[in-house]
Amino acid sequence: MKRGVTAPKALLFGLVLYAPSASAIQSDNPNPSMDFMVGAGEFGAAITGERFSVGAIAGPLGEDPRGHLRVTFPDPTFDVDTPVECLVVVDNLAAAGSEVLENAGGAVQRLVLLVEDNGKAGDPLPDRALPVRLSITVENPPAQAFCTAALGLIAGAEPIDHGNVTVHDGQPTSADVLGAAPLPKLGAGTWRVELPDGTVTTVEVP
């Protein structure tokens, strides 16, 4: 959804870079089977320096995630430029996760961008987004676990003031289900969650 004035050139970088891939997918099939999340957004005035761009795609079961994620916030811990290593899409909600950012003392940490796509330009509800940093102290947690756990935090997402994000939830065919390799088992544990405003909390995943 687009809201307000045209986004700044820096913000449009993500749209120019990633929109063709989504457009190409949809031109071949108006309801493609792939999951994807593409676009860019900015919170508040440009001077705040709070923005993101993302282009992420995966199979309809979350398999083979790929793409790129850029998040820029004044807090350096929320300033990342990284390949996408997980993607979870449920209806109009999506979570795209970074590469491992820290792995110290047994705690593995990634940044996950959450997005809620609320429609097209002119619709009353703005798109919403939220970057979060998650860490968990378990051995070799699969990347997909970070996106799955993070999606439960979508209620805290903030409206995007400028930008556009498109989320597509691909529906698997019977061939996809039968031919797909099983995703890694998502480990249970206590997740540490850091938000851009400095809030730190924990989330239990059974």
Image (spheres, rainbow, N blue to C red):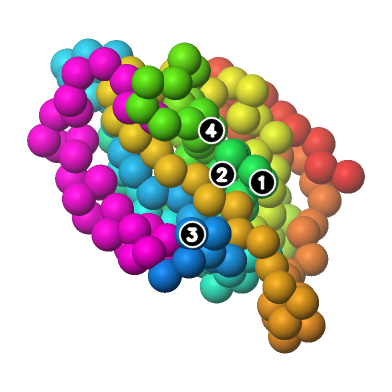
Query: Looking at numbered disc 4 in the image, what kind of residue is underneath it?
Result: Glu
Q: Quadrant of residue 154?
A: top right
Circles 2, 1 touching at the beta carbon (< 8 Å): yes
Q: Earlier in the sequence, mark 3 or mark 2?
A: 3
Residue ID at (53%, 24%): 157
Q: CA distance from mark 4 to mark 2?
A: 7 Å
Residue that mark 2 sits on: 94
Decide if residue 158 is on the left or right side of residue 39.
right
Residue 90, numbered circle: 1
Residue closest to the eye, 36 or 64: 36
Q: Quadrant of the N terminus?
A: top left
Across and down, in percent, residue 82 comes to 35, 55
Query: Looking at numbered disc 3 in the image, what kind of residue is underneath it?
Result: Pro
Q: Earlier in the sequence, mark 4 or mark 2?
A: 2
The answer to whether residue 120 is visible is: yes
Q: CA distance from mark 2 to mark 1?
A: 6 Å
Circles 4, 2 touching at the beta carbon (< 8 Å): no
Residue ID at (19%, 39%): 12
**Mark 3 Cα-neighbour bin, 10 Å: few <14, some 14–19, many ≥20:** few
**Label 2 residue SS:** strand
**Label 3 residue SS:** loop
**Label 4 residue SS:** strand
Q: Earlier in the sequence, mark 3 or mark 4?
A: 3
